[in-house]
Amino acid sequence: MTVVAFQGEHGAYSEEAIRQQFGAEVDTLPIRTFEDIFASLDDDRSTVGVVPVENSLAGSINKAYDLLLDHDFRVQGEILLRVRHNLLTLPGNGDNIEQVRSHPQALAQCESFLNRHGYTAIPWYDTAGSAKELAEHPEPKVGVIASALAAEIYDLEIVQQGIEDLHFNFTRFFVIGKGDAQQSPNSKTSLVFATPHSPGALYACLGEFAERNINLVKLESRPRRNRPWQYVFYLDFEGHWQEPDCSAAVLGLLNRAAFVKMLGSYPAAVQPTPEEFAQEAMLQI
């Protein structure tokens, strides 16, 4: 039986992503920290873990990338979750709300909504955690910002859906586990590398992909923690590393880079269609 570990309380957006990927009946394991997700894979408490790695508004989640570099698990899948923030409260209490609790990032993403209604924003440790706390310790003047799944789990009322200020709000998750994913027609590959400290080194490394017409979809640098003022580069490209051109590019990278670590080749998540983006644009008008 598949058990999927995630960071946060039941009802977290990570758990919504898990249900989107694996179905509503999947067994989930809430974990306190990102580090604990990796530990749960080590001791077989979970089969796979789901870790957020990037948000379309806030950017990359550096902690997740650092842990991927430190551990030897493989990226086995990718999930794109459209994040919809909802105002929740106790049933029948929608007209009494004076303060709203949630994770600071969720509060920031709903700032205009909160200001329009005159709600006082109260930072909380977690979106789903704020919902759980309200359900366990009811307070009539309190609302929370959390997922629709949190409302379902904790029997809270959804006062208003989609209260985020910007509706193009997606979070990208990696599914991580032991071993490689099966090769699929629509694959993406993630790896991390460092270059020699010499002029043109990064240009030469990236040229291995350009020469073979391989599309790079992400390139981001992070400090190399054991070597001050040196950097590692996280790279995503379209294709599976075992495809001939991709394999040749990776081999060329190995010959030019100071080190390379393969994070995994995996089925790429389905990107939103132009029609879906148009619908989101209409929500903003």
Image (cartoon, grey):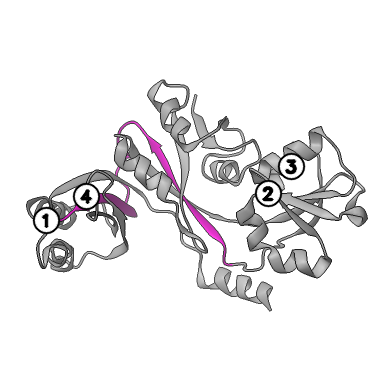
The picture quadrant where one finds residue 284 is bottom right
The residue that disc 2 covers is: 147
First of labels 1, 3 by sequence position: 3
Q: Nearer the viewer, mark 2 or mark 3?
A: 3
Q: Amino acid at mark 2?
A: Ser
Q: Secondary structure at mark 2?
A: loop
The residue that disc 4 covers is: 241
Q: Where residue 108 sits: x, y (%)?
A: 64, 61
The residue that disc 3 covers is: 131
Q: Nearer the viewer, mark 1 or mark 3?
A: 1
* Residue extending farthest bottom: 285
Residues rendered magenta in the picture: 168-196
Q: CA distance from mark 3 to mark 4?
A: 42 Å
Reply yes or no: does residue 128 show up in magenta.
no
First of labels 3, 4 by sequence position: 3
Disc 4 and disc 2 in contact, CB within 8 angstroms:
no
Camera-side residue of 271 and 144 = 144
First of labels 1, 4 by sequence position: 1
The residue that disc 1 covers is: 196
* Residue at screen point 68% across, 56% down: 85
Q: Amino acid at mark 1?
A: Pro
Q: Answer yes or no: is residue 127 visible.
A: yes
* Residue at screen point 51% across, 44% down: 21
Q: Secondary structure at mark 3?
A: helix
Q: Residues within 10 Å of mark 1 (few under 14, many from 20)?
A: few
Q: Secondary structure at mark 4?
A: loop
Q: Residues within 10 Å of mark 4 (few under 14, many from 20)?
A: many
First of labels 1, 2 by sequence position: 2
